[in-house]
Structure formats: structure tokens, C-alpha cells
Image (spheres, coloured by chain):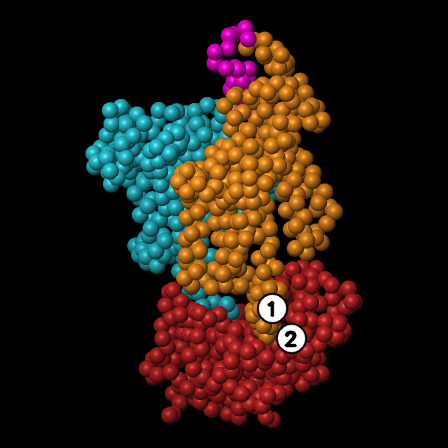
Chain colours: A red, B orange, C cyan
């Protein structure tokens, strides 16, 4: 499969009053056409900032993308997103790359009709007239499962339920049939049954549109049934990347193990309580000089405190940023 | 929408009742309204006769219901100074005060909103810093003092504008400027902070993520949302100007309600003061209703009853 | 902003910080905001003038000296440094009167805010905590009062009650209480919704602990900020009342009274009215700058909008 996105060594910092926040400290990954990659991590792990950085959406100042490459193979051939002009980037955003953000009540403009908010993407990228955009928007509303689109087109966000609003946000993201969608914590604010409906909707749309998806979440459970691969992030760096089944069966990073332990399992015995990961995330004001997880890692040894572990291949499409081999119970070679 | 408007109307009527009660109580709070209204040289007999004539000897409830029943038909008694009905005296002063307040507001809006927008879109820039400081400064200058300085310089020394009266178009310039200046400061500050706040909202990020042009985002998404608090503050400030015009009208001898209030207090003409208080409240309440309607036009959340 | 990492907020009111940490933080924050520094200096200058008035003022503010009346300030012709700001129509030293005038302004501002704040705190807390009908009733009364033409009623009431310091303080203290009540109520409501007061109750905390340990620390920031702005407004309005001859008795040296007296000699001796006006302006400016700064420091929610 050809790659649609290749990110290499991305570094993003925020220059705030309190000091320099090292939000993303060298992230590399790639995405195949039509693939669904889940990026998992706790808040502050840099997963959202990574994606925002790629598309010039971090507030600047204080944010600044320091270095890196993001090769996107869209309609205009391969181009480095980080080198595009603001105007070129705007042509990509919303057109070839769609966005779904969390908390649909605040992501939609409260005083603009749902219809207008969908149509304006279409008139912007597809050069449609208002009338054409309206027709297309009505179809999109139906496509994401909103009943009575004619009526709903004229409604305002506050007249919708949370799940309905999320469907509208998805309709906006897919409006211009993008090659790639970035979904940021899109199910976090919803209750469990609605979450499941949104995941179902996404599965259906993916098959229909054959679009690549990056699904950012802090909840491994949500993406288990839908992701192809999972990238686990910690402290602004990739901790582990693997095919989804491989990751669940054979986690190779102590943080991933912790995450899986913290996941409520339906098949677990009742006596087994939820395991939480001890300690707090690293202070991103301090520049990274060793493994970011070392503070909280029960396996940490000298080397973990001396250098930053790079991604090491540990299997087919499986890499981990850890010097310790948990299966063998000893430090890795090299 | 209708229910919203009706409830606002009901509240206003309730408030008007509250104003009448307040005025009624305040005039009697010193214990003897008659001696409050009579000159200090008045003889005890005169005061007793006045008390009887004004009905201050009747039971309080009778006095209050008389006030209410007369107020409903617009009768607020006779001015002690002019010995003619008080309300018509007040109403004929309205145009002058409205002219002054509107001119001041116009200046405040025309200068204040653009300055606030520039600041909000370029926070930290030189023009923003200067604008913020000026806004704070003009809010800190006592306007009755500034009025004196302006008269001294522009009227007495330069002779550009008349120092008092309402005889030519130039007359309104200085009083309106002084009256509008603190309002302008308020509008600059509010517009700036509203723009900053809206720009930080998630839906603006969504608009950027849609690839919309910055121009579209500013006009369609930011400005329309900024208009909501702006409308409300302009309504409130207009009401403030009607009350605050007392200094300006006094200093510039502007024949409006504020000047009449200052004079009526000097004459101890409390029936006239009472009529002024009630009528100004009525005008302010009317303005509030207009503001609420403007609100509903801009904000669908109110239009659809949320 | 997407991730929490962007704003590692160390709030001033974070209970975990030690006192010296907080002080150091306050200092750093103050220094960043030059307006705040200016505001602080102006405010302290006014407070200093009020407290040490007898030491600073070269003359008795009431001492008349008709021989030297209407002397211009020192830097003008015919002026001299014995009366730096000149003298008024009765030959009283303007500088001394300005210094003593700070006492009236600050007294009105301080006690006015104290009364308004206490009343408002109680009313607002009752409304916010009781909720439901009580809240709705209190809030509708408050909103009604706040929609009245404020200045007009202050003037009206002052005209009836007559000129005295106590009356002025009471007028501002009572008429300004709704503003404090509204803010208190909003904060209490927000705290209730956040649920941690509930969790404190369910954890067995006693009432005093809940009020002073949980509710007050969160209220204090917004209320101090508001108090600064309201005090500035009261000083402003007191001078306005004085200008109309409705504040403290005419013999008391207050900025408003001095302005009113100076107005009569505006064209011949403009300095008589100029200095009290400047005093009001700098005091008000100082307190507004201070208030802006306090709002930024004490309200972490607003800090994100700053660069």
C-alpha cells in the first residue's frame, strides 16, 4: 500500500510565560492509504499537538514547530505540509484533510445554523454555489444518520443532542471527500452507547469513502475494534507502535502494559481491580534528556536515565522505545 | 421569542413599580417630607399647611396607593418651583438629553469598536498597548473635571466651541465628547477582550481546520459572536449616559433632564425630582427592552427560548 | 489549545504552594505587567498620603490666609514653593488639602466597599447556595436594581439624606451591594456545579471547614478584584457628588468639594480646580490598573488569554 502521510522527527515547543514547554519531542510515524491509525496517550503526551502541528493549527505564538517533515501524498502529489505557505495549507485543510474534534458543543459555532456550517466548507473547497452546497449538505446530513435533514439544516447546534452534534461534525469532516481524516478525542465527551454508535458510523463511512484515519484518543478500549495499527505516545515521544492485535497480545513497552492494565476488561475476574499507573506525567518544562517514562517505570535501569530510547524493531511492524526486554527480563542489546 | 419579550416586559413593569416604591420611601425616610421640601426659613405654620395640602398626614398606605393610581395616568403632582404639573416639564427635556447621549454614544461606538477590534486581533502590538492604556485613562478621568478643562481651552482660550447652551450644532460637540469618552473606553476594553475570547474558542479552531480564509473567519465567525456582548454593553452604557448626563448638562448648561435634576435638587422641588427619577427609569427600561430585542435578533439561543 | 501540557498552571491560590513561593510568584507576575507596577505605585502613594497626611501636609488644610489667596502653583510666575500647588480663594494651601482629601476618598472607598462587599457576600451566598426559588427571587431583584440609572438614584438619595461622610458611605455601601451579590452568587453556583463542595460534605467536613476551607478561598480572588474596581468607582462617584455639593460637608477638604469650589474661579485661577481633578484621575487610574492586574493574577481562567 502507498503511504499517504510520512511524519519524520517532528518537534514542537510552546514559549509560555512559565517557560518553554516541550510538547512534541521528535515524533515519526507513517500512515497508509485507507488505514486507521490510533494515537493513544494520556493528556499532555503530545498526541493532539502532534496533529495540530502538522496542519498549522497550533496557536502561534506561543506554539512553534521547530523541525521535522510531514510528507502528505494528496491530490497535488507529495508535499511537505510543514513547508507549505499558509494559503496552500488552507487549501489542504478541510478539503483533502478533514477534522473531527472532541466536545461538539464548543466546536460548532453557536449562532450559525448547522447547514451553513457544513455548506461553507463546500463553497470554500469545491467552488460550489450556495444552492449546490445546500443540496450536498442535505445529502451529507442523511449520510451521517441525521433524520429530517431539511428541517435540521436550519437548526442551531444547541437544538441538537451531543451525539447528533458529533454526527454534524463528522459530516463537516467528510464533506469534501478527504483523503485523510484526523479525529481528536471525538468520542470522549459522549456517553457509552452514543460512543458505540459513532464508532459504527465511522466504520461504515471508512468503507464507503476509503479514507485514511488518524484517531487520537486516551482510551485504548474505544479503538480496539476499529484501528489497524496503534501508536502509543508518552511525554511527547512515541513509546510503541504496532498492529492492533499484536499490541494487545504482546505489548513491548512498560507504559503500554500499564495502559492495558488500566483498561477495564469485561472478561476480567471481579477480584482483579483496575490497575492504575503510579506517578504523574513528566514535567514538559524540562527538556528531555532520558526516557520520559523512567520516573514511573518499574524496570528502569541506568541506561534509561542516560539516553532517550529510539524506536527499536521488535517484530513485524512492531517497534518500541524501550531498552528493557520484558519477555526476556533483561536489557536489550544495542 | 414572544414569551421572552413578554417576560422582559413584565419585569420592566415590576421594576417601575419598584422605582415608585423606592421614591416613595426615600422621600419619607427622613421622617418629615414637608420640612425636606420647604425652605429652612419656612415657619412651622407654613410647614403644617404644606403637609396638609400634600396629604402627608394621611396613612402611609393611602398615600402610596394615591401615588400609584396617579402615576398610572401620568400624574406626578405639581412642581413646587414651577407650580405646573411635573411630568410635562420633564418630558419636554427629553429630546435635549437624548440628542446629547446619542451623539456621545455615536462617537464612542465609531472610535471604540475599531480600536477594540484592532487590539483584539493584534494583542501585544504597539497600537493595542496604546489603545488599552488610553481606554483605561479615559475611564479614569473625572468627566466633570475634563469638561471644565475643555471649556477653559477650547471655549475660553480658542473660542472654537460655545461654552454653554444648545443653540448651534457646535454646541453639542464638547458635552457629547466628554459624556461619550468613558463609554468609549469601556467599549474598547470590552471589544478587545471579547475578540480575544472568541478567537480562543474551539469553533474558531474548527473554522481554521475547515481551511476557511482568515477574512471569512473574522467576519462570519468572530465578529458575529463579538456582537452579542457588545450590544448588551452598548445598551447598558446608554442608560448610564442618561443618568450620568447630570454633570455634563449642569456644566454646559445643556437644557436636558440632567440640568433640570440639578436645579430641582437646589430648589428642594422633590415632586419634580420624583418625576425625573421615574421618567428616566422609564426611558432606561424602554432602552433595555430594545437591547433585549436586538439581542434576540443576533443570538438564536434567545430567539428559540433557551 | 488541545493538550493540558500547554498551560502548566501554578495558580496563586493553589493551596500546595508555600507562602514565600506565592509571594515570589506574585512579584514576578507584577513585574511582567508594567501597568500593574504603575497601578501599585499610584495606589500606595494615595494610601501613604492619607495615612501620613499630618506629617506630609505643610499646612493645616483648613487654615485660611486671605492675604495669600489664589496664589498660582510654584512653577508659575508669582508662585512660590511655600505653596507648591498654590492656594484657593480663601488662601488655603492646595497641596495640604489634596493630601487630606485622600483621607475622605479612601475612607468612602474602603468602608463603602466593606459594607457593599459584606452585604453582597451574604446575599449572594444565600442565593447561590439555596438555589431554586430563593435564588430566582433574589436574582430578579438584583437584576432589576442593576438596570436602574445608578447615578441618578445616588444623587436623588444623597439630596434627601443631606451632606455627611456617614451618609455617603452608607449610600455607596448599600447601592453597590447587588454587584457583589451577583459575583458571589455566580462563583458559589460554579463551585456547586463543580461538585467538590458536595464531595467535601460527603467526606464529613463540617460547615466552618467547608465555608472557610473550600468556598472562601475560591471567592476571595474574584471579590478582591471586584473590590478594587468598585472602590475606584466609589472614589470617582464621591468626587462627583462633591462636585454637585451633595457629598461631605463643604468645610471638609475633599477632592470633589475642592473641584466644586474651584469651578467658580475657573477662568481666573484654573489651578484651584486642576489639582483635585488630577488627584482623582491618578487615584482612579492606579486602582483600575491594579484591578486589571489582580484579575490576571487571581483568576487563572483568564490567564490563558495572555501571551
Q: Give above or below for B113 relative to B145.
A: below
**Residue on which disc 2 sits:** A124
Residue C305 rendering spot, x and y as whole percentages:
47, 61
Q: Is B141 displayed left or right of C41 in the figure?
A: right
Q: Is residue B32 visible to us here? A: no
Element carrying mark 1: helix
Q: Give above or below for A1 relative to C115.
A: below
Residue C97 rendering spot, x and y as whole percentages:
30, 32
A231 and A96: which one is in front? A96
Residue C198 rendering spot, x and y as whole percentages:
53, 50
The answer to whether residue B33 is magenta is: yes
Q: Chain of mark 1?
A: B
Q: Residue at x 33, y 48 (%)?
A: C40
The answer to whether residue B253 is magenta is: no
Q: Are marks 2 and 1 on the same chain?
A: no
**Residue on which disc 1 sits:** B216
Residues in magenta, as a range: B27-46
Tell me, yes or no, whether the two marked residues, 2 and 1, touch with CB atoms within 8 Å.
yes
Q: Residues within 10 Å of mark 1 (few under 14, many from 20)?
A: few
B140 and A33: which one is in front? B140
Amino acid at each position: 500500500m502507498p503511504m499517504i502521510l510520512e511524519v519524520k522527527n517532528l518537534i514542537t515547543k510552546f514559549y509560555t510565560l512559565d517557560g518553554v514547554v516541550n510538547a512534541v519531542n521528535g515524533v515519526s510515524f507513517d500512515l497508509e492509504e485507507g488505514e486507521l491509525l490510533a494515537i493513544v496517550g494520556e493528556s499532555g503526551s503530545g498526541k493532539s499537538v502532534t496533529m495540530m502541528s502538522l496542519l498549522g493549527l497550533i496557536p502561534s505564538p506561543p506554539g512553534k514547530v521547530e523541525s521535522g517533515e510531514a510528507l502528505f501524498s494528496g491530490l497535488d502529489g507529495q508535499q511537505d505540509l510543514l513547508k507549505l505557505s499558509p494559503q496552500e495549507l488552507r487549501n489542504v485543510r478541510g478539503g483533502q484533510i478533514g477534522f473531527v474534534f472532541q466536545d461538539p458543543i464548543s466546536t460548532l459555532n453557536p449562532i450559525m445554523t448547522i447547514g451553513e456550517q457544513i455548506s461553507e466548507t463546500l463553497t470554500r473547497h469545491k467552488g460550489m454555489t450556495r444552492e449546490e452546497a445546500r443540496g450536498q449538505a442535505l445529502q451529507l446530513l442523511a449520510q451521517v444518520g441525521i433524520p429530517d435533514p431539511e428541517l435540521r439544516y436550519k437548526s442551531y447546534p444547541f437544538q441538537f443532542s451531543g451525539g447528533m452534534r458529533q454526527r454534524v461534525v463528522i459530516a463537516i469532516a467528510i464533506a469534501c471527500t478527504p483523503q485523510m481524516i484526523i479525529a481528536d478525542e471525538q468520542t470522549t465527551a459522549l456517553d457509552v452507547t452514543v460512543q458505540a454508535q459513532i464508532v459504527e458510523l465511522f466504520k461504515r463511512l471508512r468503507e464507503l469513502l476509503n479514507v485514511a484515519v488518524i484517531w487520537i484518543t486516551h482510551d485504548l478500549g474505544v479503538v480496539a475494534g476499529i484501528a489497524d495499527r496503534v501508536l502509543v505516545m508518552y511525554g511527547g515521544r512515541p513509546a510503541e507502535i504496532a498492529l492492533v492485535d499484536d499490541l494487545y497480545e504482546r505489548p513491548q513497552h512498560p507504559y503500554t502494559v500499564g495502559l492495558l492494565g488500566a483498561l477495564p476488561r469485561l472478561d476480567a475476574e471481579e477480584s482483579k481491580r483496575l490497575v492504575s499507573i503510579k506517578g504523574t506525567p513528566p514535567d514538559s518544562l524540562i527538556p528531555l534528556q532520558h526516557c520520559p517514562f523512567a520516573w514511573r517505570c518499574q524496570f528502569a535501569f541506568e541506561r534509561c536515565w542516560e539516553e532517550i530510547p529510539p524506536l527499536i524493531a521488535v517484530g513485524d511492524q512492531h517497534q518500541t522505545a524501550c531498552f528493557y526486554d520484558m519477555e526476556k527480563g533483561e536489557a536489550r542489546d544495542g | 421569542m414572544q414569551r421572552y419579550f413578554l417576560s422582559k416586559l413584565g419585569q420592566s413593569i415590576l421594576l417601575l413599580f419598584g422605582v415608585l416604591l423606592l421614591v416613595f420611601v426615600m422621600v419619607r425616610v427622613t421622617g418629615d417630607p414637608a420640612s425636606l421640601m420647604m425652605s429652612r426659613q419656612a415657619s412651622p405654620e407654613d410647614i403644617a399647611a404644606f403637609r396638609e395640602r400634600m396629604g402627608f398626614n394621611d396613612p402611609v398606605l393611602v398615600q402610596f396607593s394615591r401615588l400609584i393610581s396617579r402615576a398610572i395616568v401620568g400624574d406626578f403632582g405639581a412642581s413646587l418651583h414651577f407650580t405646573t404639573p411635573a411630568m410635562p416639564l420633564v418630558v419636554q427635556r427629553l429630546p435635549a438629553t437624548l440628542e446629547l447621549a446619542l451623539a456621545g454614544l455615536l462617537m464612542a461606538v465609531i472610535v471604540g469598536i475599531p480600536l477594540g477590534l484592532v487590539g483584539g486581533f493584534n494583542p501585544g502590538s504597539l497600537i493595542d498597548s496604546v489603545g488599552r492604556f488610553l481606554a483605561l485613562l479615559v475611564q479614569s478621568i473625572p468627566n466633570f473635571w475634563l469638561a471644565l478643562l475643555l471649556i477653559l481651552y477650547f471655549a475660553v482660550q480658542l473660542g472654537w466651541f460655545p461654552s454653554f447652551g444648545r443653540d448651534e450644532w457646535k454646541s453639542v460637540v464638547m458635552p457629547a465628547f466628554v459624556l461619550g469618552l468613558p463609554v468609549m473606553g469601556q467599549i474598547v476594553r470590552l471589544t478587545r477582550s471579547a475578540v480575544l475570547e472568541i478567537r480562543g474558542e474551539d469553533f474558531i479552531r474548527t473554522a481554521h481546520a475547515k481551511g476557511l480564509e482568515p477574512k471569512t473567519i473574522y467576519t462570519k465567525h468572530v465578529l458575529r459572536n463579538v456582537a452579542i456582548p457588545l450590544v448588551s454593553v452598548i445598551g447598558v452604557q446608554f442608560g448610564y449616559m442618561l443618568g450620568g448626563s447630570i454633570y455634563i448638562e449642569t456644566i454646559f448648561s445643556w437644557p436636558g433632564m440632567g440640568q433640570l435634576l440639578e436645579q430641582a435638587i437646589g430648589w428642594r422641588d422633590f415632586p419634580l425630582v420624583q418625576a425625573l427619577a421615574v421618567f428616566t427609569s422609564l426611558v432606561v427600561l424602554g432602552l433595555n427592552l430594545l437591547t433585549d430585542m436586538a439581542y434576540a435578533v443576533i443570538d438564536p439561543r434567545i430567539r428559540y427560548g433557551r | 489549545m488541545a493538550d493540558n501540557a500547554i498551560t502548566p498552571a501554578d495558580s496563586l491560590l493553589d493551596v500546595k504552594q508555600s507562602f514565600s513561593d506565592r509571594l515570589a510568584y506574585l512579584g514576578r507576575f507584577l513585574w511582567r505587567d508594567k501597568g500593574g507596577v504603575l497601578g501599585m505605585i499610584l495606589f500606595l502613594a494615595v494610601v501613604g498620603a492619607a495615612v501620613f497626611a499630618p506629617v506630609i501636609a505643610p499646612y493645616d488644610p483648613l487654615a485660611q490666609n486671605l492675604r495669600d489667596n489664589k496664589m498660582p502653583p510654584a512653577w508659575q510666575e508669582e508662585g512660590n514653593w511655600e505653596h507648591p500647588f498654590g492656594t484657593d480663594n480663601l488662601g488655603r494651601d492646595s497641596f495640604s488639602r489634596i493630601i487630606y482629601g485622600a483621607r475622605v476618598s479612601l475612607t468612602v472607598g474602603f468602608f463603602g466597599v466593606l459594607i457593599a462587599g459584606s452585604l453582597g457576600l451574604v446575599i449572594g451566598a444565600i442565593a447561590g447556595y439555596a438555589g431554586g426559588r430563593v435564588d430566582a427571587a433574589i436574582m430578579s431583584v438584583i437584576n432589576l436594581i442593576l438596570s436602574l440609572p445608578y447615578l441618578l438614584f445616588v444623587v436623588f438619595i444623597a439630596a434627601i439624606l443631606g451632606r455627611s461622610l456617614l451618609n455617603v458611605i452608607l449610600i455607596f455601601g448599600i447601592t453597590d451591594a447587588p454587584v457583589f451579590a451577583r459575583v458571589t452568587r455566580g462563583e458559589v453556583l460554579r463551585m456547586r456545579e463543580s461538585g467538590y463542595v458536595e464531595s467535601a460534605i460527603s467526606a464529613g467536613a463540617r460547615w466552618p471547614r467547608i465555608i472557610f476551607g473550600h468556598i472562601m478561598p475560591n471567592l476571595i480572588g474574584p471579590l478582591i478584584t471586584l473590590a478594587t474596581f468598585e472602590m475606584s468607582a466609589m472614589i470617582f462617584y464621591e468626587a462627583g457628588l462633591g462636585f454637585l455639593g451633595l457629598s461631605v460637608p463643604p468645610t471638609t477638604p475633599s477632592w470633589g468639594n475642592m473641584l466644586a469650589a474651584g469651578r467658580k474661579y475657573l477662568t481666573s485661577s484654573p489651578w484651584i480646580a486642576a489639582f483635585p481633578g488630577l488627584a482623582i484621575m491618578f487615584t482612579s487610574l492606579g486602582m483600575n490598573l491594579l484591578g486589571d492586574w489582580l484579575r490576571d493574577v487571581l483568576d487563572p481562567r483568564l490567564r490563558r488569554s495572555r501571551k
